[in-house]
Image (cartoon, coloured by chain):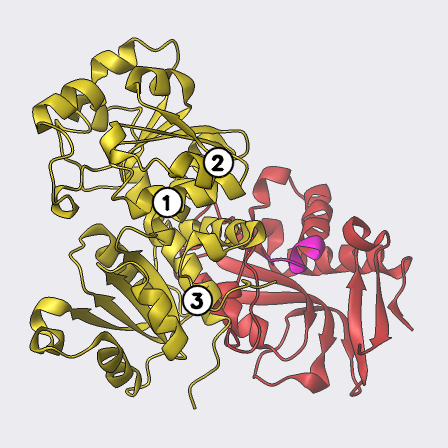
Chain colours: A yellow, B red
Amino acid sequence: MALTTKHLLGIKDLTTEDIQLILSTATQFKEVLQRPVKKVPTLRDVTIVNLFYENSTRTRISFELAEKRLSADVVNFTVSNSSAAKGETLLDTVNNILSMKVDMVVMRHSASGAPHYLAKHIDAAIINAGDGINEHPTQALLDAFSMKEKLGKLEGLKVAIIGDIMHSRVALSNIYLLKKMGAEVMVSGPPTLIPTYLKEAMDIQVEYNIDKALAWCDVANVLRIQLERQNQPLFSSLREYNLAYGITKNRLHKLSKEIVIMHPGPINRGVELDSDVADSPHSIILDQVENGVAVRMACLYLLTGRTQPTT
Amino acid sequence: MTLISEQQLPSIVKRLAHQILETYPGLKNAVIVGLQPRGVYLSDRIVAALQKEIPAEQVIYGKLDITFYRDDIRRELHLATQTDLPFSIEGKTVILIDDVLFTGRTIRAALDALLSFGRPSKVSLCVLVDRKPSRELPIQPDFTGKEMVDESPYKVKVRWQENDGVDDVILQVEA
């Protein structure tokens, strides 16, 4: 059994079986990460380049750790200290790196579709570590892994994705994945941050009242307000956003049940999520980060199985 | 063609358990580790036989998956199964159990995998079938159910009740 795809560009391209395979393989890698020696020799003949055209803390460290725990050789590229700053095109940069015998490319780019473009022009396997406002597949996979770990299943689970849906690749990847795995999905937030076509295009529920969304869901995946991608005012102030849509202790106290709180990070504390919620036992935010390494190890492992040795 | 019949297999399991106990009386400072996935069917049976001879709590038993230590990931992708070693192997004698010893590459990987959990004082190997002429690495078993002396064009198929409805070993024409 192997993945049906050579690249991991988005959840959109994966089958239900692909997702199950990645999640079950990640379970085994999570056990590896509990061992006294947390490193396995699996990818010792594989070279991976991490191309980060956009800032990242968690994802970059998580990928690099996953690669190193699998014994791969790792090359890191950040745009600020590279020739891309001198005007080299994406394809030129990648082809130059690949001529040095690199097997796999992990890429984050601010342009939606950048990894898809690359996949058409190069042979190496590509993992999308986030492209613009399109997809962030490994984040959705680690979110799913964490939900499954906490609640035992994905099927039938009610998941509310809350906040800046419009600018979120995490939202889109999560919606694709949860729908494929049989969960129910609702998005919630201010109307200005929820694209009107989403409800119909993705067959999900839209709820503008945050309290109703919280009362409905088992899991609230709270997203960051992405001020850097908003070039026009979409709500009046961060303070007002917090009052109307922020997840606060008071909001959770009003519910008749306990719900699980997730956030892909980085958190704007006091805006979309209050500190006493983020740090409460309801929150599995740090489990998400821990699981990220195991899930990325699974993706790297399964994609390597589909590559040919460089001779 | 039958290599080990349904009648022979239980007595071979019993003999292997006795040989292990003769070498390591009371399993003092020794632990049993079955190799996933197919070695575990044999180790389950050996452990059951051991527990008839000595108190059950003296039999310390774990399962090891070696998928991530293989040397052939680019040739064939293997899916990992659960590793369950809920005890320390530091300074212990580890008795590895697998069904068929063929090229020796699985055991090579198992030795690497084992060392990620600590430094055993000794590792010994118990297998149901030893295909000696096919060995590619200098690895030999300490406890052998049945040794195949001659080169064989056939595939050794170990069948277990859990999967195939019968406990025996047959020789098959390679598919």
Which region of the structure is painted magenta? B35-42
- Residue at 66% across, 60% down: B39
Label 2: which residue? A203
Dot label at residue A172: 1
Answer above or below: position of B88 versus A67. above
What is the distance, in whole Å, between disc 3 and disc 2 at their CAs? 26 Å
Provide residue A250's location: percent of width, then percent of height: 22, 12
Q: Position of residue A136 (x, y in %)?
A: 33, 52
Q: Is residue A279 visible?
A: no
Residue occupied by mark 3: A7
Q: Is residue B89 visible?
A: yes
In this rendering, the count of numbered labels is 3
Give whichever of discs 3 and 2 has the lower sequence position: 3
| Residue A230 located within the stretch drawn in magenta | no
Locate residue A293, reporting x and y percent. Answer: 33, 53
Q: Crowding near pointer 2: few (<14 within 10 Å), some, many (20+)?
A: some
Residue at the (27%, 60%) spot, across then down: A65
The residue lying at 8 percent from left, 67 percent from top is A80
Q: What kind of element bears circle 1?
A: helix
Vertical position of residue B99 compared to residue A141: above or below: below
Q: Are marks 1 and 2 on the same chain?
A: yes
**Amino acid bearing label 1:** Leu
